[in-house]
Amino acid sequence: MKKYYLIGIVLVVILLGYYGVNALFTKSYEIPTANVQRGEFIISLDESGSVDAKRAMTLSAPRVRGLQITWLAPEGSMIEEGATVIKFDNTEQLTELTDNESNLKINKNSLERARKEYTIQEKQLKLDLEKAKRNYDEKKYDAPRIAEEAKMEFELAELNFEAKLEQLKADVDKAEVEVQRSEEKVRKAQRELEQLNLKAPIPGLVVYLEIWKGGTMDKVQEGDSPWPGQGLINIPDLSEMIVKTTVSEVDASKVDSGQAVMITLDAFPDKVYDGVVITKSTLARKKESGSKINVFDVEVQINNNDGELKPGMSASSKIIIQKLPDVVSVPLEAVFEKDGKTVVYLDNKKRREISVGQKNDMYIEVIEGLDGDESVCLLDPTLDEQGLPGDKATEPEINKSEIKKPPQQGGRRGGKGRG
């Protein structure tokens, strides 16, 4: 009896160990559920992009030789229209302006003298001409020789009048040309001097651009000597902001100007900005260099700009394609294909066949099969019943060993009787 008793205890220990270890390595799954939705159903396109200013201006280096930056408005500062943003060294231009102004003054004096000389000579020549004419009138009836001399003196006075006035007029014209050239040089020097103080054409944010500096690209700074015409500072007007995004050529026909857009930013995930599509490019382009995907560029205007938006911020745009009223919908992960039929599983794990319609990025419309007050499983519960793959650890070797059964008691009794 003691032998059978000990064997029984060993069997109990082995069975307890098997089920205990098995329970230890078996995971228990609780099927997640979600309520069926009923209400407005929004069909949208979710596209990523970045924030930018609707209007921006770039300040470039003036086309002046020997440029060197002496002062820059602080990067990130807000400036008003007309405020100075960049100053260049103006020593050379000031010297040139002073020299040109001196030359202009000299040339103006020369012109004034030439005009006075012309006036004086004109009066003198007229007087000489009148005297010669009067002398001729008085002597033309005298002796032929005297009359001929008077006539020649008169003709000579006429020729002298015309020739000298023509020469004096040429001197005045030449002086006027020199004055005009000097004035143009002064104006040019003044323009260059004015260009050495770049002012903001619009109000906005100061953003430094990168320029080429001896083999590397780096942001512009004081002391740099940029090339004429090189872009130095960008000024975006933050009063009107947009989101620049793209849509694939497959979805491009669904997007048009005037469509409402819901915008969220990575920097402010709890805020939702209202927007509207304002432009869509006419032609498609490659999404990236070497890519086979074609996209259309889309610009979305942000209507409720709160002053927190800055160019370059990452943005997600939900372009509203259509709004359907009073629609029953479920999460996409709650819908399954079984035996060629579309089904959901209620929270009691009962299968229900449904008919579906349109979908967005998270939900799908249910045309038939649900009323809107149910709760559905987000995982297939039949997999849980069958055992999800990997829900049990490798079976311990102790469970694989054979357990020897004790001999039948009847045989033992028979043997005992025979003894």
Image (cartoon, rainbow, N blue to C red):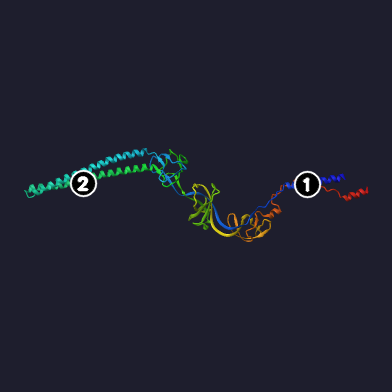
* 86 left or right of 314 in image: left
Tell me the quarter of the picture where residue 67 sits: top left
Which residue is most to the left? 143
Q: Residue at x 32, y 42 (%)?
A: 186
* Residue 271: x %, y % from top left: 54, 49
* 413 left or right of 371 in image: right
Q: Residue at x 79, y 46 (%)?
A: 14
Q: Amino acid at mark 1?
A: Leu
* Residue 84: x %, y % from top left: 41, 42
* Residue 160: x %, y % from top left: 17, 46
For mark 1, give the secondary structure.
helix
The residue tagged 2 is 166
Q: Amino acid at mark 2?
A: Glu
Q: Residue at x 28, y 43 (%)?
A: 179
Tell me the quarter of the picture where residue 341 sits: bottom right
Which residue is most to the bottom? 368
Residue nearer the viewer, 39 or 53: 39
Q: Which mark is residue 16?
A: 1
Vertical placement of residue 27 versus 352, above or below: above
Asked whether the residues under the numbered discs 2 and 1 touch, taking CB atoms below 8 Å apart as contact, a structural biologist would say no
Task: Decide which of tag 2 and tag 1 comes sooner along the chain.
Answer: 1
